């Protein structure tokens, strides 16, 4: 049996992420209408989250199947049942944007930490800590008792 591919996409009519035909048609397989445009912000948040979960699962599964392919015994292919496969392309429902935002924030955070690390990197263990913290008597804390482990990961 040949492989059939559907795209899961937001349907304005169904108000849900439904399977759509691929190619020029692109109609929802549930209601038959075509959703040309929609705003992600108009999609209920729980529907977005459901779809992101599907998208993430597909991403994870395809990673595993690539790993399995690397390890696969060629003999197994001869006995593997090919066919009757329905392939569903999951839309990301904003997940890619979320991932990119997160990556950008992590990059910014890393730059911030690098800058801060500059203040600490030439400090000796027994010198006072550049962060300026003091003990209960107002005496500056030594670096080795204060922030010395803060940049372990740099
Ligand atoms: Zn529909
Ligand atoms: Zn400190």
Image (cartoon, rainbow, N blue to C red):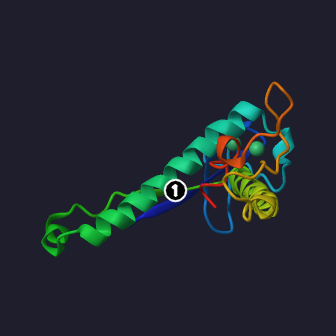
Nearest the viewer among 20 and 81 is 81
x and y, in percent, of residue 74 in the image: 17, 75
Tell me which residue sits at (52%, 56%) in the image: 59
Tally the marks. Answer: 1
> Is residue 30 visible in this depiction of the protein?
no
x and y, in percent, of residue 43 in the image: 79, 39
Nearest the viewer among 133 and 75 is 133
Q: Quadrant of the C terminus?
A: bottom right
x and y, in percent, of residue 28 in the image: 66, 49
Q: Secondary structure at mark 1?
A: helix
x and y, in percent, of residue 65 in the image: 36, 61
Tell me which residue sits at (78%, 33%) in the image: 44
Question: For residue 73, which quarter of the picture?
Answer: bottom left
Judge left or right: residue 125 versus residue 128.
left
Q: Is residue 49 above or below residue 104?
A: above
Q: Residue furthest top?
A: 136
Q: Which residue is mark 1?
A: 59
Tell me which residue sits at (66%, 53%) in the image: 125
Nearest the viewer among 52 and 131 is 131
Tell me which residue sits at (70%, 58%) in the image: 124
> Crowdedness of circle 1 by 10 Å Cα count: few (<14), some, many (20+)?
few
Q: Is residue 119 above or below residue 133?
A: below
Question: For residue 47, which quarter of the picture?
Answer: top right
């Amino acid at each position: 049996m040949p492989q059939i591919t559907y795209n899961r996409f937001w349907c304005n009519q169904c108000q849900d992420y439904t399977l759509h035909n691929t190619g020029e048609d692109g109609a929802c397989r549930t209601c038959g209408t075509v959703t040309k445009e929609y705003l992600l912000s108009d999609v209920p948040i729980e529907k977005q989250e459901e779809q992101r979960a599907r998208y993430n699962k597909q991403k994870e599964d395809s990673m595993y199947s690539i790993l399995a392919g690397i390890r696969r015994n060629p003999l197994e292919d001869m006995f593997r049942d090919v066919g009757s496969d329905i392939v569903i392309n999951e839309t990301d429902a904003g997940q890619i944007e979320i991932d990119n935002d997160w990556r950008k924030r992590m990059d910014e955070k890393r730059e911030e930490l690098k800058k801060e690390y500059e203040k600490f990197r030439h400090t000796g263990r027994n010198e006072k800590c550049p962060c300026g913290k003091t003990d209960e008597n107002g005496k500056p804390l030594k670096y080795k008792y204060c922030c010395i482990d803060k940049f372990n990961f740099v």
